[in-house]
Amino acid sequence: MLRINDRIAIEDWELTEQFIRASGPGGQNVNKVSSAVELRFEAERSPNLPPPVKTRLRKLAGRRWTKDGALVLQVDETRSQARNRDIARDRLAELIAKACEKPKRRVPTRPTLGSKKRRLKAKKVRGEVKALRGKVDPD
């Protein structure tokens, strides 16, 4: 079981791990040992995640979200399979914890009178500078 916070815990049946061969450094070992991990979390079918959290998680996941509603994380950072597995689980927990945070509602503000006046004054000055760039009469 993977604990996210005091209310959310991910059951083991919701996670599937598949070990694949990693690319990158590792010498001869890289061709023989499956050290990279692909962690798949069935987020859409998870009974432990509330609907608003699922929606935010989908947005945060981006390309890692599959059509059938699963979140797929691939980790091949280290040569150790166990370490990669821990990194993948930590990343999943971090992502879900981030999705649990409700974003603050933006309060629309209006520009101050002073800022409006400054903007119009700057436009006027700029217009005058451009007006002086015209052709000069020889008279």
Image: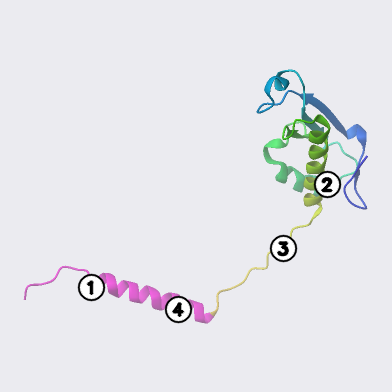
Foreground mark, 2 or 4, reads 4
Query: Where, quadrant-wise, is the N terminus in this rendering?
Result: top right
SS under mark 1:
loop
Gap between marks 3 and 4 measured at Cα: 29 Å
Marker disc for residue 118:
4
Tell me which segment is drawn in magenta: 113-139
Distance from the alpha carbon under mark 1 to that under mark 3: 47 Å
**Disc 3 + disc 4, Cβ < 8 Å:** no
- Label 1, label 4: how far apart the Cα atoms are: 21 Å
Q: Quadrant of the C terminus?
A: bottom left
Above or below, 102 relative to 38? below
Determine crowd level at label 2: few under 14, some 14-19, many 20+ residues with C-alpha closer than 10 A.
Answer: few
Compare marks 3 and 4 and give the one earlier in the sequence. 3
Label 3 SS: loop
Give the residue at mark 1. 132
Three-letter code for the amino acid on which mark 3 is drawn? Arg
Residue at the spot 39% in from the left edge and 75% down from the top edge: 122
